[in-house]
Image (spheres, rainbow, N blue to C red):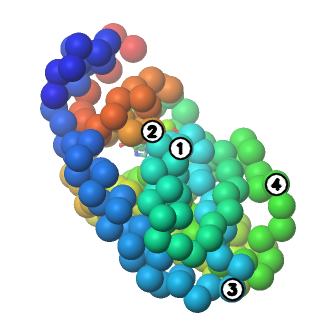
Amino acid sequence: MADGSWYDADIDRVIISEEQIREKTEELAKQVAADYADAEGGVLLVCVLKGAVMFMADFARALGRLGPSSEMEFMAVSSYGSGTTSSGVVRILKDLDRDIAGRHVVIVEDIVDSGLTLSWLMKYLQSRSPESVEVVALFRKPDAIKVPVPTKYVGFDIPSEFVVGYGLDFAERYREVPYVGVLKPEVYARS
Ligand SMILES: O=P(O)(O)OC[C@H]1O[C@H](OP(=O)(O)OP(=O)(O)O)[C@H](O)[C@@H]1O
Ligand code: HPA
Ligand SMILES: [Mg+2]
């Protein structure tokens, strides 16, 4: 998928294309719209920064066209640092700005890998007395799960390889790549 961009030379292969992401986002929005059609107060989307930034922007617009109404909250958590494996310690870098008590919360996440981030986050949000909490995750690595997480809405199951693009980074780079792909081994060797 070379398009003359700076990252062409670093990408080994594409795993999920832009078109596949677009179609899947619409599908997920349809499912959530149907399930929450009668939700009182609409849904409160909680975006897990930074990785979910692209998915949140596209998913929220797709959901908005189908209804119900939504509001957005942003949390920033990090457990990967600059490496390719989870440290196992989830750090809150930015907390919720307001009360979620009584709300229908949908966590918007880019990827479920070990499951550590989401299992921690679900407990954290559930302790704040929402009406309900579910998760929509665009990607999941079924073979990498260490902690089972009830992820109601999942886009793609992908192999247990480190991937970048569509919000996913390696050492903060490659988030702007519009598809999801695998880096060439030499990229890791030089960092
Ligand atoms: O299931 P897990 O093994 O916990 O991995 C998933 C989490 O890891 C990544 O975040 P990261 O800690 O890299 O922060 P970032 O979103 O700012 O890149 C990703 O965006 C998910 O939030
Ligand atoms: O495969 C991945 N890529 C980037 N960030 C991640 N965070 C968890 N898994 C991944
Ligand atoms: Mg990351």
* Label 4, label 2: how far apart the Cα atoms are: 22 Å
> CB of residue at label 2: within 8 Å of ligand 1?
yes
Check disc 4 and report the residue beneath it: 97
Check disc 1 and report the residue beneath it: 53
* Mark positioned earlier in the residue sequence (2 or 1): 1
Q: Could you say whether the residue bearing mark 3 is in a helix, strand or loop?
A: loop
Check disc 2 and report the residue beneath it: 167
| Residue 57 x/y as whole percent | 52, 48
- Does residue 122 appear in the picture of this structure? no
> CB of residue at label 4: within 8 Å of ligand 1?
no
* Mark positioned earlier in the residue sequence (4 or 3): 3
Q: Could you say whether the residue bearing mark 4 is in a helix, strand or loop?
A: loop
Q: Could you say whether the residue bearing mark 2 is in a helix, strand or loop?
A: loop
Q: Depth check: 190 or 166 in front?
A: 166
Please give the name of the residue rendered at 58% of the width and 88% of the height, measured from the top-left corner.
38
Asked whether disc 4 touches disc 3, contact meaning CB atoms under 8 Å apart, the reply is no
